[in-house]
């Protein structure tokens, strides 16, 4: 754990006692702060009390005694409307920050030169974060990985010379981190997402840009226009990454071959199963650029790329039955993310659906020729059926178990060399599952039942 000592001797309000919120409260108390915490969930409040956290309803609190509001990233700061705690904090004239800001202040206090790699982007940030951490660990370095992926940042070991913090950051977390200043800041891509929480695409992109603006070195994917514009505005040290674009002064990827500025081949990722598809080639090139900047040798990088296991629920190869490959891409909760999976395979038996997001699957139409059959589940079934009508054969299955069974049977009859049963829902999971992890775990269990 990293004790947050910069509020020692002062009282702070904290709203949101989920995983990262509870970890933040524990960290603040360990650092000498008095915490008054609240959450709408009685279960979360009970867990906090069990950990010795002071819990009280912030609606009736005296806000003149608070030095700051520590806000969980899932709580609206600006859109669609500020949370009521935000209004109370602004009325009291106190700052509003998140757990990553507490980490940054602690780093500045105890180990300002400790390596801090921060990764953001609309898609690919979890894979890239895990891949960077994997390469650094494989090179024998002390690595702490967390943030938006897995472990809350304040649950990690404290910053120290020679200890590498590799941290995935969502736009919500960046928005609550005014002093963000990583050693290496990574921006992978920007496409429309979370606009309900940021209002406009311009606001969303501006928040993402803040991550690299404060970094000692920026690594930016320039295949999309918003990211390219950010790279062009950047005035500090910068490495550009291009896959769709080859006219890049930086690292480029063609047919899975990552090349340096002078065109020399650095690594071949074309045959690595955990890094299938052009989007993963970008992730790999970014990780290579970061590792090179941190003095990892090209030989160490190449070895680590081959041994990278990939992430659960992100194009995860969960099994084979004969020629049929089963892929769990449950983390694809929007069409843009699902697009990456569809470009990586052919003869796809596609399981999709759930709680739909704005725009549906219309943007995937150019890839429909890769789909042999679609199997619809969840609340989006009617809308997706309308999009697929006359373009892709589909079956309304309702539930994941029915869809998996039917997709497996159909794929087994295919004459393709490697038919793929792909769960890539392009939807949130909350209509039928607790989370995308729950959805992916259930798919994996169903596949294991089919293949014995």
Image: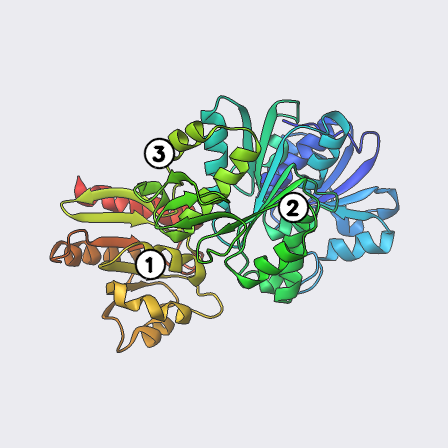
Q: Which residue is mark 3?
A: 306
Q: Earlier in the sequence, mark 1 or mark 2?
A: 2
Q: Nearer the viewer, residue 82 or 260?
A: 260
Looking at the image, the residue that sits furthest to the front is: 262
Q: Which residue is mark 2?
A: 16
Task: Answer with the quarter of the image where residue 186 lies.
Answer: top right
Mark 2: few, some, or many residues within 10 Å (few <14, many ≥20)?
Answer: many
Q: Which residue is mark 1?
A: 342
Q: Earlier in the sequence, mark 3 or mark 2?
A: 2
- Which mark is in front, 3 or 2? 3
- Which mark is in front, 1 or 2? 1
Task: Answer with the quarter of the image where residue 154 lies.
Answer: top right
Res 123 seen here? yes
Q: Is residue 195 left or right of residue 126?
A: right
Where is residue 15 shown, x and y percent of the image? 69, 46
Where is residue 72 shown, x and y percent of the image? 65, 46
SS for callout 2: loop
Asked if marks 1 and 3 touch (Cβ < 8 Å), the reply is no
Q: Nearer the viewer, residue 219 or 359?
A: 219
Where is residue 6 shown, x and y percent of the image? 79, 32
Res 39 seen here? no
Asked if marks 1 and 2 touch (Cβ < 8 Å), the reply is no
Identify the residue shown where x is 25% and y is 48%: 326
Separation of marks 1 and 3 at Cα, in angstroms: 23 Å
Separation of marks 1 and 2 at Cα, in angstroms: 36 Å
SS for callout 1: helix
> Quarter holding the N terminus?
top right
Q: Earlier in the sequence, mark 1 or mark 3?
A: 3
């Amino acid at each position: 754990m990293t004790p947050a000592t910069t509020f020692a001797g002062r009282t702070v309000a904290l709203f949101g006692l989920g995983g990262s919120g509870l970890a933040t409260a524990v960290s603040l108390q360990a650092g000498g702060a008095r915490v008054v915490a609240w959450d709408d969930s009685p279960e979360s409040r009970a867990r906090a009390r069990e950990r010795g956290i002071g819990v009280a309803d912030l609606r009736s609190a005296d806000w003149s005694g608070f030095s700051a509001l520590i806000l969980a990233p899932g709580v609206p700061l600006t859109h669609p409307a500020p949370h009521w705690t935000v209004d109370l904090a602004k009325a009291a004239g106190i700052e509003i920050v998140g757990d990553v800001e507490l980490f940054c202040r602690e780093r500045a206090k105890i180990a300002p030169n400790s390596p801090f790699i921060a990764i953001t982007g609309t898609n690919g940030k979890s894979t890239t974060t895990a891949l960077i951490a994997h390469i650094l660990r494989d090179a024998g370095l002390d690595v702490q990985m967390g943030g938006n992926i897995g472990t809350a940042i304040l649950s990690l070991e404290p910053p120290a010379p020679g200890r590498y913090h590799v941290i995935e950051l969502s736009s919500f977390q960046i928005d609550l981190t005014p002093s963000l200043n990583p050693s290496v800041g990574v921006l992978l891509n920007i496409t429309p997402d979370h606009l309900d929480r940021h209002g406009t695409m311009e606001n969303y992109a501006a928040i993402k840009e803040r991550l690299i603006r404060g970094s000692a070195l920026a690594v930016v994917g320039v295949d999309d226009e918003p990211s390219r514009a950010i790279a062009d505005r950047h005035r500090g040290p910068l490495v550009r990454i291009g896959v769709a674009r080859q006219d890049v002064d930086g690292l480029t990827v063609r047919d899975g071959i990552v090349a340096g500025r002078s065109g020399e081949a650095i690594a071949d990722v074309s045959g690595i199963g955990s890094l299938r598809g052009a989007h993963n080639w970008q992730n790999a090139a970014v990780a290579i650029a970061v590792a090179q900047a941190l003095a990892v040798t090209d030989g160490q990088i190449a070895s680590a790329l081959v041994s990278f296991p990939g992430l659960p629920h992100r194009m995860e190869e969960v099994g084979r039955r004969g020629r049929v490959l089963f892929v769990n891409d449950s983390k694809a909760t929007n069409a843009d993310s699902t697009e990456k999976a569809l470009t990586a395979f052919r003869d796809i038996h596609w399981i999709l659906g759930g709680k739909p997001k704005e725009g549906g699957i219309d943007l995937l139409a150019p890839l429909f020729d890769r789909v042999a059959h679609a199997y619809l589940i969840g609340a989006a079934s009617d809308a997706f059926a309308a999009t697929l009508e006359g373009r892709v054969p589909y079956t309304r299955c309702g539930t994941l178990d029915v869809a998996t069974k039917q997709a497996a049977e159909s794929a087994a009859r295919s004459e393709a060399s490697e038919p793929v049963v792909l769960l890539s829902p392009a939807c949130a999971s909350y209509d039928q599952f607790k989370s995308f992890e729950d959805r992916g775990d259930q798919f994996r269990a169903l596949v294991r039942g089919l293949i014995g």
